Image (cartoon, coloured by chain):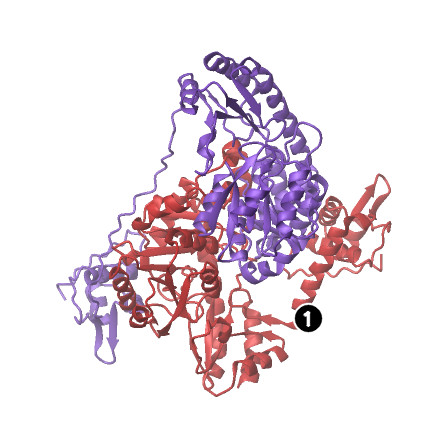
Chain colours: A purple, B red
Amino acid sequence: MNELTINLNEKLHIPLYEQIYQYIKDDICSARMSCGEKLPSTRALAQYLEVSRSTVEMAYEQLLSEGFIETMPRKGYYVSELEGVYRQNFSGEKYSKVRGKETKKYDYDFNPNGIDLYSFPYNIWRKISKEILIDDRSELFKSGDSQGEEDFRYAIQNYLHQARGVNCTVDQIVVGAGNEYLLMLLGMIFGKNQKIAFETPTYKQAYRLFEKLSYEVTTVDMDQYGMQVNKLRESGANLAYVMPSHQYPLGIVMPIKRRLELLKWAVESEERYIIEDDYDSEFRYKGKPIPALQGYDANGKVIYLGTFSRSIAPAIRVSYMVLPKPLIEAYHKQCEFLSCTVSKVDQCVVQRFMEKGHFERHLNKMRALYKGRHDILLANLKPLMNQCRITGEHAGVHLLLHFTDGRTEEELISLAKEHRIKVYGLSKYNTGSCDQKHATILLGYANISEKDIVKATEILCEIWK
Amino acid sequence: MNELTINLNEKLHIPLYEQIYQYIKDDICSARMSCGEKLPSTRALAQYLEVSRSTVEMAYEQLLSEGFIETMPRKGYYVSELEGVYRQNFSGEKYSKVRGKETKKYDYDFNPNGIDLYSFPYNIWRKISKEILIDDRSELFKSGDSQGEEDFRYAIQNYLHQARGVNCTVDQIVVGAGNEYLLMLLGMIFGKNQKIAFETPTYKQAYRLFEKLSYEVTTVDMDQYGMQVNKLRESGANLAYVMPSHQYPLGIVMPIKRRLELLKWAVESEERYIIEDDYDSEFRYKGKPIPALQGYDANGKVIYLGTFSRSIAPAIRVSYMVLPKPLIEAYHKQCEFLSCTVSKVDQCVVQRFMEKGHFERHLNKMRALYKGRHDILLANLKPLMNQCRITGEHAGVHLLLHFTDGRTEEELISLAKEHRIKVYGLSKYNTGSCDQKHATILLGYANISEKDIVKATEILCEIWK
C-alpha cells in the first residue's frame, strides 16, 4: 500500500472522497498504478487514511462509474485495462480580463455600415425589459414557437404592412437571429443544386454565405436601374438576391419598371425566386419610403428579408423573413424542428417597443438625424463637383463619390488617411467579376456628427481638389 | 360582480395578481365580459377575493397596459372596445385553448425534455438584466465579437474547466444561439464530402440537421458502453456525434475505456473528429459529474458542445462550442464574417449570472430538486420490476423502462393515456436502422412534482403490472 501516497488536506474545500478519487485517478492516468493492479480494500484504505469507510467507498464508486477501476465479487477492486491513457494537462489559462484596446488612428470615420447609437432610447428599452421580466414570468422561459412568437409576428406583419407595403400573414413570417441565419434556413429550404445571382458589387456577407453553403454563386452586372434582367436570364440562376430600396453599396433605388421586369423573370419558371434584402429601407429623405418589391408580387415569388439590427441597433440580433406561400410547406418540412434563435425576452421587448409606438418614434428621429447629416454632407462636398460625381443620395446612410480625374482609389484613401480621415473604397465590395472604370469612394454618415462632417469634408475638399 | 367568478389558488406558483389578471383577460377574450362593462372597484374586488388591494391594482394595471380595460377618472374601470385588438383576443383564445388541451388530455406528463421552470431565479435574472442595461449603455448595442464577447467566453472557459474538466483557451470558444446554429457553423467549417456517424437511437435534431446540410449521415449501434468503435470504423465516417456523459435517449454513461477507444479512432486519421454533445452533464446524482471526453483529448480531436438552454431555461438561446486548435483557423476562414447570433445583452446577463455564483447555486438547487424526483420515481417503480428493467438512472432528467413481457410500446403508451398519463416511447428516437427487441418507455421527471410522481407511478404500476 505504501506506493499509494495520498495526502488528504482538511483545509481544502474539496470533499475528502474527491481528493482520494483524484489521487488514485492521477496515479492511474500517470501509470503510477498499472492495469490489473489491486486497490486496497475500502476498509484498509479508510483505516490507513483515518477517514470513514463510506468516504473511501464514495471515491471508489466514482472511479468505478468512470471505468477507471473494476470490481470482482469477493475479490476487490482492480485498475482497469486502459490502452494509452492520455494525461490530463490542465493548461487552461486563469480567468483574467484582457480587453483589446485599439489605438485610435482616425479623427473622422465615414463608415458606411455605421449607425448612430447615442440616439438609442436606452431608458425606454430598459423600462420595457423590466416590465417584460415582471409580467410574464415562467411563460417567458418556456421554449417557444420555432417561427418566433405569434404576437411578435403580428407586430412585424403590422409594421411591414404599414411602413413597407408588404402583404403577408403571420404564418409567412420567420424570426431569426440575424439575416445570415435566415439565409442559412433558406439554404435548407431550397436544398441542393441551386444557382443564385447577386448584383455586383453587392453585400458580401450574403454572397460569401451562399458560397459556404456550396451554392452555385454568380454575379450579374447592374445599370443605373439595378440588376439587368436580361443578363440575369442569361446567367441561368434560379435565385436572384437584390436590394431594390437602396442597393448596397451603390445606393441605387430600383425603379418600378425594373422591379416588374424582375418579377416577370421570376414567374417564367417555377424554380425561380427573388430574395429582397430590404436592409436600409427605413431611411429615405425624399418623398415617402418606396414600397417593398414584395408588395408588387402577386405570384408568391419574393422572399422578403428585414432586420432590426440597422433600424434599432447592431447588437439587437433580430431579423425576419417573409416567405411566399409556395415555400411555407417546404419551411415546415425542412426547418420547423429548429427552435427559434431569438430569445423570447428579446422578442417580447422588440414587440412592445413596436406596439407602444416607440419603434416608429425612433425611426422618425433617426430619419431626421440622418437627413440632417446627409444634407450637410452633400452641401459640403460641392467644391469637389469638378473632380467627381455623387450617387446614392436621398436614401440609406451612405453616398458615393465617383472620381473622373484618373486618380486611383488607393491614392484617395491614403490621402485621406494621412489626414486621419477614414473613407472606404468601392473595390472592396467587388465580387471579382465587375471592373470599375472610376475610383469610387463610399462616405457613410450615420455615425459621424454634423460638426465633424463639416470639419472632415473641409479637409477632404482641400486634399482631393 | 357575481358573474365575475375568480377562484384563486394559493398553491399555484403563479402570483395572485397574475391569476386575477388571467381570469379577467380570459373573460374579456371569451366575451364573457362585454365591451363597456364596468369592473368592480379595486377595493370591492380585494374584499371579495380577500386579497390586498394592491394585488388587485397590479392586475388592473396589467389589463390597462395591455388595453383590455380603460379607466375613467372618478368613474372606475371598464372593458375596452375589443374590435381593434384582434391580436390580444386571438392570442388570448389560443392561450386558453392550449392550456385547455394540455389539462384536458393529461393529468401527468413525463416529458423527457421537460425542465422545471418554477425554480428559475426570476428576481435575480431581472435584477441582473436591469444592472446590465444601466451599466454599459452604448457599448452594449455596438456590434460585438463574432465569436461571442471575450469576457463571456472567459466565464464559460472558467466554468467548463472547473465543472467539466474541459481544457481550452477563450479563442477556442464560439458562442451561438442554440446548438443547431453551432452545428450549422460546423457544417460550414468542415465543408462538403463529410460522413457523420450518430449513435442509434440518438438526438434526432442533430441527425436531421446534418441530413439537411446534405452530409452523408449514418448510424452506429451501441452496446452498454455506448457507440461501438469497431462498427464506427467500419462505417467509414470521419465525424462521430456522441453524448458520453448521458446519452440521449438511452442514458448510457460512456466509461473511460470506451472514451479512450473513441479518441484512438479519431487520432488514426487527420480528417476524423468527435463531436461531444454534453447536453445534460450538469445533472448527476451519484458521485460528482463525470468529466467531459474533451478533457482526455490530447490531440485536438474533440469538438465540445454545451448549452444553457437546459441548465437555465429553454428560452435562453445561448449555446457554446469548444473547437480543437486544428479547427480554429478553419473557423476564422469560413465563419468569422458571421456576427454572433446572441445579443450582447443576453451574453452579459448570463456572464454576470455565472460570475456572481448564481449559476452554480442554480445548478445545485436543480440537481437537488431533480435528484429528489429521480429517487422517488425509482422507488415507486419497484412494483414493476418483474415486468421491466430500468436503465439510464443516476443522471440526466429521464430514465428508461425496458419491458420484457412482450407488450408493445403502443399498448403501454395508450394504457397510460387512458389514465391521463403521458409517457414516451423509445421508438420515436430511432433513426430507422436500429431495431428494438423490447418495448421501452422513457420517463422524464424534470417537470413533474414529487407528489405527482407518486400519484402517477401508483397508476402506472397498476395498469402496467
Q: Residue A145's quadrant in the figure?
A: bottom right
B414 lies left or right of A87:
right
Q: Is residue B9 in view?
A: yes
The answer to whether A57 is drawn above or below residue A375 in the figure is below
Q: Is residue B84 above or below residue B276?
A: above
* Quadrant into which the N terminus of chain A falls: bottom left
Question: Looking at the image, which is closer to me, A56 or B75?
Answer: B75
Give, as a three-letter code, the residue at label 1. Lys
Instruction: Sort mark 1 into few (<14), some (14-19) or many (20+) by Cα contacts within 10 Å.
Output: few
In this rendering, would B284 be left or right of B272? Answer: right
What x and y, as percent, mark residue B308?
47, 53
Q: Along the line of sight, which residue is nearer the eye, A69 or A452?
A: A452
Where's residue B210, x and y in %? 44, 61
The answer to whether any part of residue B82 appears in the image is no
Percent position (x, y) of residue B456?
Answer: 57, 75
In the rendered image, which residue does mark 1 sit on? Answer: B104
User: In terms of depth relative to the viewer, which is nearer, A369 or A33?
Assistant: A369
Give the quarter of the image for residue B10.
bottom right
Judging depth in this view, the residue of B246 and A375 nearest the camera is A375
Chain letter of the residue carrying label 1: B
How far across and down, in percent of the image, does residue B420 sit? Answer: 63, 75
> Which residue does the image show at 19% across and 61% down from the upper left?
A27
Is B271 positioned to the left or the right of A182 in the image?
left
SS at mark 1? helix
- Residue most extreme to the bottom: B405
